[in-house]
Amino acid sequence: MAEMVTYLPISSPFIRFAGRYVDEAFGVAAGYNFFVFEAMLVPFEIVACNVIIHYWSDIVPVGGIIAIVIVLYGVINIFAVKWYGESEFWLACGKVILIVGLICYTFITMLGGNPQHDRFGFRFWRDPGSFAPLYKTGSLGRFLGFLQCLIQASFTIAGPDYVSMAAGEAENPRAVMPRAYNKVFGRLMAFFVLGSLAVGINVPYTDQELQNAFSNNEPGAAASPYVVAMNRLGITVLPDIVNALVLTAAFSAGNSYVYCASRSLFGLALEGKAPKIFTRCTRNGVPVYCVLIVLLLSLLSFLQVSNSSAVVLQWFVNLVTASQLINFSVMSFTFIRFKKACDAQGLSRDSLPYKGRFQPYLAWYALVGCFIMTFVGGYTVFLPGMWSVPTFLFSYTMIGVFPIFFVGWKLLKKTQWRRPDEVDLYRDVADIEEYTRNYVPRPPKNKYHKILDWLFN
């Protein structure tokens, strides 16, 4: 993505590149897949908020909390959208502080800095062990446990797609975007990998409170496994602070997904790939019908009223994971076609603002890996005695929907598969190059802005 986006930084780039470098129908299918991906994360975060709130009290019924959160999302996204960017910036800073604090907490407590003065270190990696068997015993069980973690990682790992979405509005994108892409990998390593490592250090998979969260739908550990670790060590107050910050992060994430999903649908409508009614906006420029569609889809969170929260969360995880893996497959295949077009038309990749290493081999690796994992995500329904119609539908619906959109649009519009020598690699590039040549960086307004520029650059 970095090569394509820094060469031509436009809004919704990987969706539009799919139509531009592969086939218009491919871009339409990618656009609707991304919309579903974003829209389904909204009910996921609503259910997560519900679980966290019930850590403190269950006085307010499940349906009441869901309704309140949906109404708040509607008010924020329709009437207070002008505060969206500023609020999300500070909420994102809060998320960074939270994960850094939890990693530091892990380091301190594992070395004995806890009320019990227990220097437990990596004890849980030995007892009960680092590889938990799942569904089966022995080596097969440990492999299935690892596979389940790999599927969960497929749900959590995101970054290049969100960075790409900002390309069309970024200031001096050919200079800024390469730095942003490079930092994605560092942040994934720092926050995701270290965060996962910290959970494994703090809590054994045999912990009863952890197991009760999933088997008996108890809220504490489901809100955060760090709560279990703090309860085991007799730490008070801190669990409430952690859950409050996690609640803020979950609410903020859901609000972001409402915004992103509605704008994705709005972009499709502007290009004539969704009904024209979705182009209608309020006086403040809010695509109100797009927001309403996203909020209607978020009503799926009411599934929690008649099902375990852990089960409902897993359903949304399955659906979102499949969409995300399809999304990554689209990116990989689009880049492969982009490189073929560059080779066919004599555009040297050495002249691009950013050049990735080991291409197109890594793109093929990503394509094959993501494509396989898309089908593996719901494998549990095929194990003896574990068939579940909802789990099957949530795991494999998008695998069927994507080709339906592709074939349907192709038949409707008679689109053509683009040959490498026919791909338009130069449209809009001249405007970007002129902007880059004439760009004059703005100096920081004050010392405060200078510190922020240094910190985030």
Image: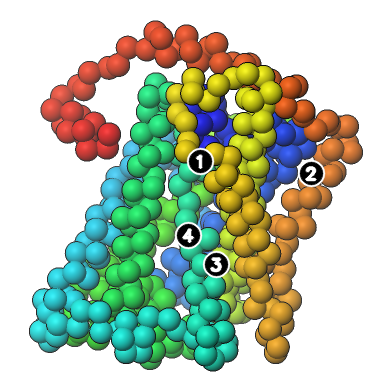
Residue for point 50% across, 82% down: 142
Residue for point 54% across, 91% down: 137
Labels 2, 1: front one: 1
> What separation in Å lies between label 3 and label 2 (alpha carbons)?
26 Å
Point out which mark residue 166 bears.
Answer: none
Point out which mark residue 156 bears.
Answer: 4
**Quadrant location, the C terminus:** top left
Q: How is the image coloured?
A: rainbow
Q: Position of residue 129 (x, y in %)?
A: 36, 85
Lower position in the chain sequence, tag 2 or tag 1: 1
Circle 4 SS class: helix
Lower position in the chain sequence, tag 3 or tag 1: 3
Residue located beneath label 1 in the image: 358
Circle 1 SS class: loop
Lower position in the chain sequence, tag 3 or tag 4: 3
Question: Looking at the picture, which amino acid does disc 2 mark?
Answer: Phe
Point out which mark residue 151 bears.
Answer: 3
**Do the residues under discs 4 and 1 have CB atoms within 8 angstroms?**
no
Point out which mark residue 406 bears.
Answer: 2
Circle 2 SS class: helix
Q: Is residue 62 visible?
A: no
